[in-house]
Amino acid sequence: MAFFVPVSAVNFPYVNRSEVVVSFFSHSNPRDKPFSQPQEVRSVLSAEEWQDRTTALWNHFARYTWSKLQRIYLTSSLFISLLGPILINIIVNRIFFANVAPLRFDASDEEILRRISLIRRAHLTNFIIVSSLLLLLWVPYLTYKSTGRKRLEVLLRSFNEADSAKGNMQALNWTCPSTSTFQSSAVILIQLPVALVSASQPSLFQQEAYLPEYIQKPNAPQAYAAPPGPPPPNHASDMLNYGFDPVTKAPDANQGASKQ
């Protein structure tokens, strides 16, 4: 299955949408379920061309990126590269120094020179074996990955040349940023020419158009509102009832005279 995500205009010098991101997954084969074609490239590529190209790309990734045998080989090579030099060093030391007694304090110069020569031979043997082991493990893997990368570049270059032959308005640029053996996905970037984008960019009212960002955002959580408390007491009315002036807080003479 492939997902087509419009890239934000902030990341690119063009105001209009200038790139389409196509994601391939190892569990989704376009031969079983064809990938839906993006709206931006429908005026440039036919449905048959889109199906042929996505199938060719998926087959390439399945062979050079998602291979289970390649993952097993890479995992085994990592473990052997970590543990192999340690085991080789132990074996070489046992072979060269198994029956060698420690040097005495009064050892002669010839004995010291022979011991130094023996240590150098052991170190050289250890280095040659470890280097040969690492080359034997990693040269085939790196060669295989390099071959896959070159074939992917040739495949994408053929797509670009075929699109360039149609004219400048339809010159798409197919690129692949990077691939990983331990990932089950791969990304292909299709860069659109500015003239094609401005001429065939779908509006928000067309079917299958991308929704604006403010529509796709989730609803904001409701803010917490404290429950209303009891109303504050009215001390002024209480003072008037008991014959006090609320301003001076002194007994009201008029109210006292009226009560008399």
Image (tube, helix red, strand yellow):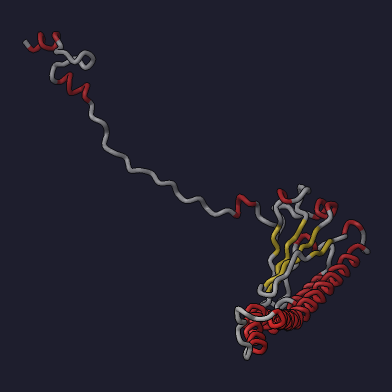
For the residue pair 222 and 60, the one nearer the viewer reads as 60
Residue at position x 76%, y 63% from top? Answer: 189
> For the image shown, how many numbered marks are present on the structure?
0
* Quarter where residue 75 is shown: bottom right
| Left or right of 246, for residue 18 | right
- Quadrant containing the N terminus is bottom right
Q: x, y percentage for residue 47?
A: 80, 71
Q: x, y percentage for residue 117?
A: 73, 81
Asked if 167 appears above or below 51 in the picture, the reply is above
Residue at position x 84%, y 55% from top? Answer: 193
Asked if 82 appears above or below 215 in the picture, the reply is below
- Quadrant containing the C terminus is top left
| Left or right of 204, for residue 200 | right
Visible residue check, residue 92: yes
* Quarter where residue 43 is shown: bottom right
For the residue pair 113 and 96, the one nearer the viewer reads as 113
Residue at position x 87%, y 67% from top? Answer: 157
Asked if 248 appears above or below 234 in the picture, the reply is above
Q: x, y percentage for residue 232?
A: 26, 31
